[in-house]
Image (cartoon, rainbow, N blue to C red):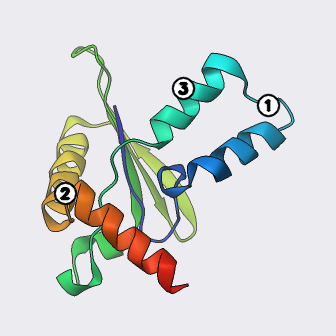
């Protein structure tokens, strides 16, 4: 499982299906067949938005990604990106802290349907 929190970058999860297919088709080694369909399906999964009216919160400082593996013996990791670099954290306490922070952001965020509605509303305003 990969969970990502993005402060300002628009990840693939927010791309439209038409845009995704165009990007995948125009790659130097285009995705086709089952691989193409799998890549599109993954990007069409659930997304949550933290609305501005939540106000200041600890997620305004950096982007991060949490990676967890199916095998419970395989440790996860947290990948942080910041203004002038990045780092990968593998200590259990750092991974726990990342998971707790992500859960907190999940609680702050709108549910899936409200997030989608907000995205559509903002897109329509542009």
Task: Say if 24 sits above or below 56 in the image.
Answer: above
Q: Which residue is mark 1?
A: 30
- Secondary structure at badge 3 equals helix
Q: Is residue 75 visible?
A: yes
State the mark number for residue 38.
3
Classify residue 26 as left or right of residue 39.
Answer: right
Q: Earlier in the sequence, mark 2 or mark 1?
A: 1
Residue 66 on image: x %, y %: 34, 42
Mark 2 vs mark 3, foreground winner is 3
Q: CA distance from mark 2 to mark 3?
A: 25 Å
- Secondary structure at badge 1 equals loop
Residue lying farthest to the right in this orientation: 28
Along the line of sight, the residue nearer the viewer: 57 or 27: 27
Along the line of sight, the residue nearer the viewer: 82 or 123: 123
Q: Residue at x 42, y 62 (%)?
A: 6
State the mark number for residue 50.
none
Alpha-carbon neighbours of circle 3 within 10 Å: few (<14), some, or many (≥20)?
Answer: few
Residue 95 on image: x %, y %: 24, 41
Q: Residue at x 34, y 62 (%)?
A: 116
Q: CA distance from mark 1 to mark 3?
A: 13 Å
Q: Which residue is mark 2?
A: 106
Q: Residue at x 64, y 46 (%)?
A: 20
- Secondary structure at badge 2 equals helix
Q: Are marks 2 and 1 in contact (CB under 8 Å)?
A: no
């Amino acid at each position: 499982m990969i969970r990502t929190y993005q402060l300002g970058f628009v990840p693939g999860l927010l791309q439209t299906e038409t845009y995704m297919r165009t990007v995948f088709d125009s790659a130097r080694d285009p995705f086709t067949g089952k691989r193409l369909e799998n890549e599109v399906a993954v990007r069409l999964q659930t997304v949550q938005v933290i609305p501005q009216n939540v106000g200041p919160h600890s997620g305004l400082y950096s982007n991060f990604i949490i990676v967890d593996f199916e095998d419970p013996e395989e440790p996860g990791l947290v990948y942080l990106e910041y203004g002038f670099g990045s780092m990968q954290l593998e200590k259990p306490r750092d991974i726990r802290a990342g998971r707790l922070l992500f859960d907190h952001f999940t609680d702050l965020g709108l549910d899936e349907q409200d997030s989608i509605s907000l995205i559509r509303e903002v897109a329509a305003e542009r």
